[in-house]
Image (cartoon, rainbow, N blue to C red):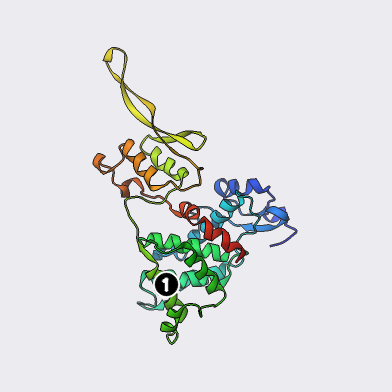
Amino acid sequence: ATSNPNPDNGWVSLLRNEWVSMLRNNPSTGWVNMPRNRWVNIPEIITVGLVNNDPFASHGVINYTDVIKAHYLIADYFMNEGEQTICGVKDFNILGSALGRQITGYGSFQKWTRPEEICATLFYGLIKNHAFHDANKRTALLTLLFQLNRFGRTVDVKQKEFEDLAVNIAGDKYSSYNRFNTFRKTQDPEIYFIADFIRKGTREIDKRFYPVTYQEFDTLLRRYGCFLEDANGNYINVHKPMKEKTFLGLGSKIVTKVVFQIGFPGWKKQVNPKALKETLKVCELTEEYGIDSQAFFFDADPMSALIDEYRGPLKRLKDR
């Protein structure tokens, strides 16, 4: 970071409320003026979907785009709540080192092959490597939750247990875990312990419904002509295209009607499973109408919803 950015070198100064729109709409490299006149690097690599020649993209593991997206989504979410932060990659080589832990090996031999081990070694690397200017533990936790989701797993213990794990990894404090003694004499006791913690503290995801925000749910609904609109207070209307007979019943036309109403805490909040289920049923987007959950949620990105679901731990980790 620097206090004297030079516009001639591709640096730009933006107001706090402008930086997020730049990330979404303008993939230009630059520096963004954050609260308290702090400057952070916003390189092109962070724009959604868009790391060129990502060496990890072809390995089916978490890659640069995944982690950097997690980092900036956290910044976006909590800045909207008034939090002041500094964000950005401090060292891409260090970040690459953490990502490379997932595919450590030689020849055809892979050191880590079980899902929980792959999650554990990346989680450990992201926390300990300090590749970002700030929010390393928060970025690591959101990335872990996202990676678990990819493996079809979700947390099955109190969220604070994973929050505490992140803090203890950062401080090399394993003495409070009796289970750690089981792995103390192994070559990588920390990774084997974390993997064991993850295995015992997670369960299989219910694949019938996926975690999505209202914003993403609206995007998915629009694929089928339905949408969310007309938010009023804590509720929002569900609209659905319907066939209606024309005058004298001589023909028909498609009109959009309000068919349902669900609770609405905000576009970035996660849709609760009951509202999700009822909306899909009313919109005839369920298996009985030929639309199974995997088809409906195809390409759904759970990362934003995970931030909302784990808001508590992610917020507290800032000061731990």
Left or right for 145, reference 18: left
Q: Position of residue 103 (x, y in %)?
A: 42, 72
Camera-nearest residue between 36 and 39: 36
Camera-nearest residue between 31 and 239: 239
Q: Secondary structure at mark 1?
A: helix
Q: Position of residue 202 (x, y in %)?
A: 38, 65
Judge whether residue 53 can be spotted in this image.
Answer: no
Residue 120 quadrant: bottom left
Q: Residue at x 37, y 78 (%)?
A: 107
Camera-nearest residue between 85 and 253: 85
Please, what is the three-letter code of the amino acid marked with disc 1?
Phe
Left or right for 50, reference 117: right
Q: Specify the farthest residue to the top.
A: 248
When the figure is inspected, residue 270 is found, relative to residue 179, above or below; the finding is above
Residue 93 quadrant: bottom right
When the figure is inspected, residue 270 is found, relative to residue 110, above or below; the finding is above
Q: Position of residue 39 (x, y in %)?
A: 69, 57
Q: Specify the farthest residue to the bottom.
A: 185
User: Label 1: which residue?
Assistant: 197
When the figure is inspected, residue 212 is found, relative to residue 127, above or below; the finding is above
Q: Residue at x 28, y 46 (%)?
A: 292
Q: Residue at x 36, y 39 (%)?
A: 279
Residue 105 quadrant: bottom left
